[in-house]
Image (cartoon, rainbow, N blue to C red):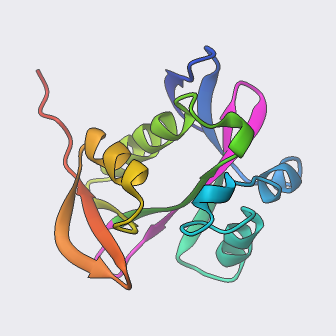
Amino acid sequence: MIDSVLRDRAGRQVTLRPVDDDNWRAVADIAPRDDQRAWVPALAARYLLLTMRSDVWTSLAVYAGETVVGHVMWGVDDDGSRWIGGMVIDAAEQDRGIGRATVRTLAGWLAGQGHPVRLSYHPDNLPAAALYRSLGFRPTGAMEDDEVIAEFTPAPPG
């Protein structure tokens, strides 16, 4: 389990846990809002299949308290950089700070491994761009397919 003791707006602790025999169905059924389907699949099941068929990605279940509320995955690129991808928070659970807590938790954990942390997003996905920027991700100027690549720049201690 990856836990940074962050909570959603309802006071539930947000944790990232391995996808396993007990939670995979709940993770597979995670569905975004209809207006987000231009950027993410209709169900998180697609990301689960991707992680099963690839050596690059690892899926994690996003929990709020003891309830599965989302999916996120991470991977390691050829240059050793860590990537965050495939985040979907269930439509019924959005606007509660879960996505923010998920990215903060995973970015912090990955940054602790001593490698750059990156993610990508479609330039038209303005809510994602604003969220990632507010969490310390800065566009690198590079693109992956049609997406902006951003790298995590942690705030200096103090």
**Front-lying residue, 157 or 151:** 151
Q: Give percent across and percent down for residue 84.
A: 45, 60
Q: Is residue 39 above or below residue 26?
A: below
Quadrant of image for the N terminus:
top right
Judge left or right: residue 137 versus residue 46.
left
Question: What percent of the width, then of the height, locates residue 87?
Answer: 56, 56
What is the quadrant of residue 41 in the picture?
A: bottom right
Q: Residue at x 72, y 72 (%)?
A: 46
Q: Nearer the viewer, residue 108 or 92?
A: 92
Q: Is residue 112 visible?
A: no
x and y percentages locating residue 25 in the rendered image: 88, 55
Relative to 80, say whether 72 is above or below: above
Residue 78 lies in quadrant: bottom left
Q: Is residue 77 magenta?
A: yes
- Residue 69 point in image, percent of width and height: 71, 40
Q: Nearer the viewer, residue 83 or 148?
A: 148
Residue at left offset 42%, top offset 60%: 125
123 magenta-colored: no
Taking the spot 57% from the left edge, 69% from the top edge, the residue there is: 38
Segment tinted magenta in the rendering: 62-81
- 122 is higher (above) or lower (below) than 32: below
Q: Residue at x 52, y 40 (%)?
A: 99
